[in-house]
Image: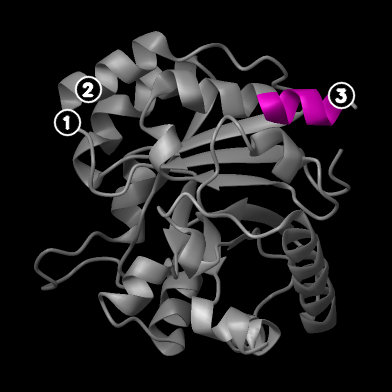
Amino acid sequence: MSTHQRYLIAGNWKMNGVLSEAREFIRALAENPAPEHVEVALMPPFTLLHPLADKLSTRGVRLGAQNVYYEPKGAFTGSISPLMLRDAGCRYVILGHSERRDIMGEKNDTIRHKLDAAWNSGLEPILCIGEHLDDRKSGNTNAVLTEQLSVLEGSDAEKMLTIAYEPVWAIGTGVTPTTDEVRDTHTFIHQKLTDIGKDHRVLYGGSVNAANAAELLGLPGVDGALVGGASLQAESFSQIIQAAASCANN
């Protein structure tokens, strides 16, 4: 089992899901088989946060958001503040996802502002890091991750934080790194976090599914999973939670 906190299985719905689908998902979601060892969280679109908050809470599922702006309020049309996320019942917020970095052009300075805003509002960030395929092939993975983790330098080491390692080339492709690559990269990330000031829980993300979850979660340094497409179906998401529970008991 992880040497850090209990496993976290977090589902990132991205831009998917309307209320009727979300209600059906919750109806079909199986009970967490090992709540003392596995924490479950769901990050639906903003429109579903308030409607799902109480329903997820009664099932012991944490609520999270997929992004946040760094101001508490003001003339920022289309943005959501940390205070609004807290008001909706959120515990977590995903920051630095590769789709935000690559499509929306977010850089480290913006991500750091968001980290500070999340911490100041009592949210726990899930900071996503990961390399592109050309970085992996050219041997630059560790350099890329080091640069992305530099956003944490100077921050309070006692702040709650989860890291999600998501190789960009594995997100939504059905391709995952080898077990050696995942193990070695997680070992490197844990060491870098220790060097910066404090180790934190490190999730793996990128084409996690019911078939490969147990193998991935059983690797040293893997403290849970950030699940994309497989979190949209209650059955597959429940199977991943079950895999985490089995790993915790081994």
142 displayed left or right of 78:
right
- Disc 1 marks a residue whose amino acid type is Val
- Residue 69: image location, x then y, percent: 30, 68
Secondary structure under tag 2 reads: helix
**Above or below — where is 106 with respect to 119?**
below
Residue 127 drawn at (x, y percent): 54, 65
Which stretch did the figure color magenta? Answer: 243-249
The answer to whether one can see residue 132 in this image is no
In the picture, residue 45 is in which quadrant?
Answer: top left
Residue labelled with disc 1: 18
Determine the CA span between mark 3 and mark 1. 35 Å
Q: Is residue 23 above or below residue 195?
A: above
Give the labeled residue for mark 2. 21
The majority secondary structure of the magenta stretch comes to helix
Q: Are marks 3 and 1 in contact (CB under 8 Å)?
A: no
Q: Quadrant of the N terminus?
A: top right
